[in-house]
Amino acid sequence: NGLPGLGSSCLGHGAPRATFRDRVCEAMLRAARLLARPALGRLHAVQSMQSMLRPRHCITVHFMKQGEDGTTTVAAKSGQTILEVAHEHDIDIEGACGGECACSTCHVLLEPEAYSKLPEPDDDEADMLDLAMNVTDTSRLGCQVKLEKARDDGLRVTIPAGVVNVLS
């Protein structure tokens, strides 16, 4: 990222919408980063740049590691999963199955108030959580929680100490 406020998903964390100039700058920086990665190609960079110019519904998410001090605060877009946000911001959540609800490596812990606002986990998620370590009453799989601005702004996500990868 390198430049304060320009490398994140949403600019102006406190503001509901970044200025058009800010979105253009952010889109250009992101496109340049994507073009520097040969595997992604130009079409992906252009599509990414176009999507960056659209207004965002910014959500602030706070990530913490269980048993460690410190919090990483990031900006997320409405509709992203916790796992997608973590990967976008280099937060250490594995997601071995690629977000397909086929493992428990994106297991996270939520605060009780935030957990109670979410829809109940479906049977597939509950089955995968049965395989996770350090499960609590507020455990969820990061790949199954889609963020919503009104519900999740300021969400605190704790990454548990142990991870079990059922795919390996």
Image: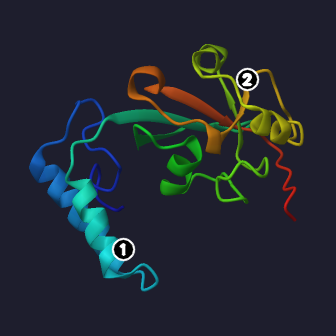
Residue located at (20% from left, 36% from top): 17
- Per the image, label 1 sits on a secondary structure element best described as helix
User: In the rendered view, how is the structure colored?
Assistant: rainbow
Residue located at (83% from left, 45% from top): 162
Placement of 45 over or under 54, stated as above or below: below
Placement of 83 over or under 109, stated as above or below: below
Does residue 121 appear left or right of residue 86 in this picture? right
Asked where in the image residue 34 lies, by quadrant, the reply is bottom left
- Per the image, label 2 sits on a secondary structure element best described as loop
User: Which residue is labeled 1 in the image?
Assistant: 34
Does residue 47 appear left or right of residue 21 in this picture? right
Asked where in the image residue 1 lies, by quadrant, the reply is bottom left
Residue at the extreme bottom:
38
Q: Amino acid at mark 2?
A: Thr
- In the rendered image, residue 101, in percent from the top left (x then y), is placed at 72, 48
User: Which residue is labeled 2 in the image?
Assistant: 138
- In the rendered image, residue 164, in percent from the top left (x then y), is placed at 86, 51
Residue located at (56% from left, 41% from top): 82
Q: How many marks?
A: 2
Q: Which of 157/84 is in front?
A: 84
Q: Which of 70/14 is in front?
A: 14
Q: Amino acid at mark 1?
A: Leu
Q: CA distance from mark 1 to mark 2?
A: 36 Å
